[in-house]
Amino acid sequence: MIPPSDRLDVAIEITRLAAQVSLGHFRKRLEIDTKADQSPVTAADRETEAAIRAELERRFPGEPIFGEEYGRSGSGEDLWIVDPIDGTRSFIVGLPLFGMLLGHVRGGRPWLGVIRMPALDEVYAGLAGHGATRNGTPIRASDCRRLDDARLMINEVDRIAAGAPRALDRLLGAGALRRTGADCYPHALVAAGTADAVVDYGLEPYDFLPVAAVVEAAGGLMTDWAGAPLTMASDGRTVTAATPDLHAELIALLNRP
C-alpha cells in the first residue's frame, strides 16, 4: 500500500511530466476536431491524457482510470480521474488559463486532487486530512461568510443563461465583486483564498472531482446546486464556497423560485 501523501506526490510528478506534452503544443498550429458533444479536441488533449495514463499504469498498475478523451479502463468504485486539458477553448486561442486535472476517488468521493496550470507554472494540490498547497506552500480558503462581501466568480455564463436564466440574473447582482470565467482556475483561487466562491454549470466528473478534492482540503466546500456532495453521478452544476455560511447563501440564491 502506498501512503496517501506519497500517492499525492506521485500524482503531482505525473502532472509535471505531462505538462511538457501540452506545452509542446501551446500556441502552435493545431488541428481541431469536434467531438459528439460539439466540444473541441486537439492532439494536445489526446497526447497529454495518453502520457498521464501511461504513468498511472506504470506507478499504480491495475488501478482503474477514467479520463475525458479515452474513457474508463478497469472496474471498481475507487479510480483515477483525468482531464488532460481543462479549458481546450482557452488552449486553442493561446489563453494561458487552461489547466490539467488529476484526482482520485475513494468510496465514491474525491479525496486527492491536483490542479496544474502549465502555462502559469502553478500547481495546486490537496489531500483529505492533510490540507492543500500551491507550489508546495500551504493555502487555505478565506473566511468570507456573507455573499454581500464575497469575491464571486461566475463560470460558463452562456450555459447558465441558456439553462437557468433567472439564477444568472440573481448571480449578476450578487457579491461585492464579480468576475466571469471558465474552467478550473477560479476554483483554485477559492482554495488559495483570493476568491471566495464560484458557481459553475455543465461540468463532467473529470471537470469537478479533482477540483473538489483540492477545494475541500483547503477548507472550502464544493457541492452541486442542491448542496449535495459531488459524485460521479452529479449533474454538473456546482457551487464552490470558502465557508459554510457563504455556501448556504449561494444555494438559497440559486434555488429561489
Image (cartoon, helix red, strand yellow):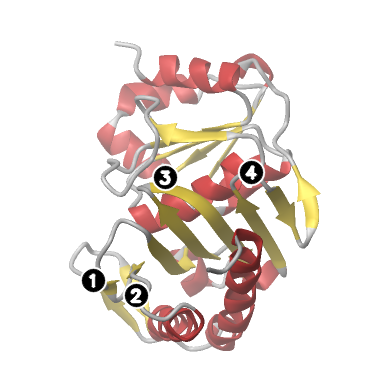
Coordinates of residue 49 in the picture (x, y in percent) = 42, 79
The three-letter code of the residue at mark 1 reads: Lys
Marking on residue 41: 2
Pointers 2 and 1 in contact (C-beta within 8 Å):
yes
Specify the amino acid type for callout 2.
Answer: Val
Q: Is mark 3 on a helix, strand or loop?
A: loop
Marks 1 and 4, how far apart in space? 38 Å
Which disc, if any, is residue 35? Answer: 1
- Sequence-wise, which precedes: disc 2 or disc 1? 1
Q: In this view, does 55 lie above or below 122?
A: below
Residue 129 is tagged as 4
Tell which of 111 and 52 is nearer to you.
111
Q: Which residue has dot 3 on it?
A: 156
* Type of amino acid at the residue the image marks with label 3: Glu
Residue at x 58%, y 70% (from the top left corner)? 11
> Is residue 100 visible in this depiction of the protein?
yes
Circle 1 SS class:
loop
Image x and y of residue 181, in percent: 53, 47
Distance from disc 4 to disc 2, alpha carbons, whole Å, reads 36 Å
